[in-house]
Image (cartoon, rainbow, N blue to C red):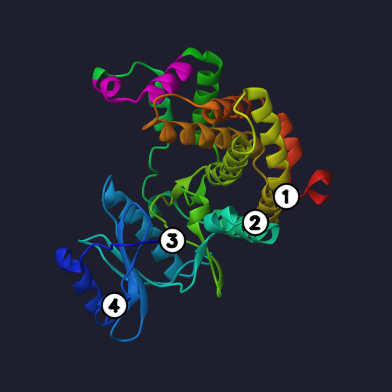
Amino acid sequence: MRQTPLPVDLERVPEVSRAVDRLGLGVLLPETIHSFNGRNDNWSGRTSTGAPIFIKKVQGYQARQRFERTLSFEKLRRLGRAPVPAAQCLGWDEPSHIMIYELLDGARSTADLAEDQAFTAELAREAGSMVGRLHNVRVEDHELPDPPAPWTLLECRGAVSAEAYALASGALLETWGLLQRDSMLATALDRLRHDSEQAPAAPIHGDLRLDQFLLSENGLRMVDWEEFCHADPARDIGAFIGEWIHRAMLAGLADSPTDGETLMKSWGQELDHRMPIIRAFWAGYAGERPVTDAGLGVRVAGFTGWHLLDRVLAGSIERHRLGALQRAQIGVARTLLLDSGTFLKITGIGTDTPSKEMAA
């Protein structure tokens, strides 16, 4: 986990120290305090009782709902109903939306491991197994908060308000224009939304990026449960696979000219290098959760494409125009949403056991 140099001064947030003290952990020793990158203020270090802890104050957009989802997972875990390796929660403070965890000393996110080409197929299989166990957890609808709306991507397909238009970057306007003119893609996105809402639901992480897995001397752990909800399992699987396709495309752009044909050829080679990771993840998942949902594979392909489109939108906010990478990602996302067959055949997704290609 990468540290940021300047954690927020605890004197400005006295509720943090009060929460730590109420748990009998003493006080954070100032010389040990550091923070990590993230959307929430956070503090890590050792306390006067010798405890290594990580504190997160959930804040910003829908902070209350995100805190409640985090707490929902922790309550299931404490009841022994969520057999997923996770950082040990030491306690929380509901009024201030503070969660306190045992600090995983020396932990690295699998995003960092991927950057260093140290994310192995073995780790991917373990991650897939963990996600499968999570999706196997049995809950009633009322036990989890309502899922966050994942469909913000669809809002740009219609008319854009004058205010949104005035604030949008050039690249964002280009992206909206491409999506608005593509009726086949719009239909595919609507179909994905409909099929996902009708699909058998399960407890899902809801924001399954590579930095949501931490590897320490105690093994692999899943973290950050702010989007935890009862929804379509394909969302988690597609997000994980989409991360690897996105990384393959980034690597392809770095090593090739920016013309589309050469980029796609280079991207294909980079994806071949990462395909064992995708296949191992799926093998681990299917080993824990045999597929009984006939439409799962097609929805996974759709959410993989969704992830790429979401990446384009996020990256367009501060760009003057779309680059070769963004246009290529839109093209690949379109293919995944409109014609998933080849992708599913290569990866083996949607079948209970690895395909011959996966075993190779």
Between the C-alphas of marks 4 and 1, the distance is 43 Å
Q: Badge 3: few (under 14), some or many (20 or more) residues near its Cα, within 10 Å? A: few
Asked whether the beta carbons under mark 3 and mark 1 sit within 8 Å of each other, the answer is no
Going by the numbered disc 2, the residue's amino acid type is: Ala
Mark 4 or 3, nearer chain start: 3
Pick whichever of labels 3 and 2 is earlier in the sequence: 3
Q: Dot 1 corresponds to which residue? A: 276
The residue carrying mark 2 is 124
The secondary element bearing badge 1 is classed as: helix
Secondary structure, magenta segment, majority class: helix
Query: Which is more toward the observer, 343 or 248?
Result: 248
Q: Gap between marks 3 and 1, in whole Å?
A: 27 Å
- Kindly tell me whether residue 175 is visible in this rendering: yes
Residue 6 image offset from top left, x and y in percent: 28, 62
- Mark 3 vs mark 2, foreground winner is 3
Q: Which residue is mark 3?
A: 2
Q: Which residue is mark 4?
A: 31
Q: What's the residue type where badge 3 is placed? A: Arg
The residue at the point 49 percent across, 70 percent down is: 80
Q: Measuring from the top left, give residue 70's x and y in whole percent.
A: 37, 58
**Mark 4 Cα shell of 10 Å, populated few (<14), some (14-19), many (≥20):** few
State the separation of the CA atoms marked 2 and 4.
36 Å
Which of the marked residues, 2 or 1, is nearer the chain's N terminus? 2
Q: Is residue 173 left or right of residue 11?
A: right
